[in-house]
């Protein structure tokens, strides 16, 4: 079965907003530092989902920009996840508490030292390097990345 999701990294020009997933029970991302985002709802575009999820998880109104698409085959049992990757440099509002974990502005130079999925480490480095639009695939066995591929466009 296919699942569609978004992930977004808010960027204030010197830091990325990361979500330390430390609040939800039985969270596949427990302990990891990731962007904000979530599953697309019926009839929703990836852009609409990113805007909604950013607001729900941070309290901020943002204008996310699509940077890539990643396939995670069989990431959760019997589910292939297709994730739209966004960044946002335009946002406003007051940062709020998040039910899924702790939000923290992390300086660029510290982002890649935070515990996360190996594939996330890879694509976040592409975002920090301003690499062109990408289509990637990260295959895991449990928490171990076993295969990856990427195409860059532009």
Image (spheres, rainbow, N blue to C red):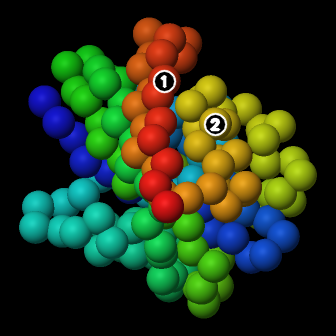
Q: In this view, does 67 lie above or below 82?
A: below
Q: In this view, does 130 lie to the left or right of 29?
A: right
Q: Where is residue 39? Give x, y as percent.
A: 29, 52
Q: Is residue 61 left or right of residue 131?
A: left
Q: Can residue 131 be seen in this view?
A: yes
Residue at left 59%, top 43%?
123
- Quadrant containing the N terminus is top left
Q: Mark 1 points at which residue?
A: 148
> In the figure, 8 relative to 126: above or below?
below
* Camera-nearest residue between 47 and 76: 47
Is residue 114 toward the left or the right of residue 25 in the image? right
Q: In this view, does 96 lie to the left or right of 135?
A: right
Which mark is on residue 122? 2
Relative depth, front residue between 132 and 112:
132
- Residue in the picture at 89% in, 52% down: 109
- Local secondary structure at mark 2: helix
CB atoms at circles 2 and 1 under 8 Å apart?
Answer: yes
All told, the count of numbered labels is 2
């Amino acid at each position: 079965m296919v699942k569609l999701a978004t992930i977004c990294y808010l960027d204030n020009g010197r830091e990325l907003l990361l979500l330390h997933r430390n609040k939800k029970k039985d969270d596949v991302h427990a302990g990891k530092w990731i962007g904000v985002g979530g599953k697309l709802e019926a009839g929703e575009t990836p852009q609409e989902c990113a805007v909604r999820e950013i607001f729900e998880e941070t309290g901020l109104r943002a204008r996310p920009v699509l940077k890539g698409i990643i396939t995670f085959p069989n990431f959760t049992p019997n589910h292939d996840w297709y994730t739209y990757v966004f960044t946002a440099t335009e946002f406003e509002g007051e940062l709020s508490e998040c039910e899924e974990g702790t939000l923290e502005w992390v300086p660029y130079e510290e982002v890649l030292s935070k515990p996360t999925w190996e594939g996330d480490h890879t694509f976040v480095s592409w975002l920090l390097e301003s690499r062109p639009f990408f289509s990637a695939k990260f295959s895991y066995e449990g928490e171990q990345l076993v295969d990856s591929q990427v195409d860059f466009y532009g």
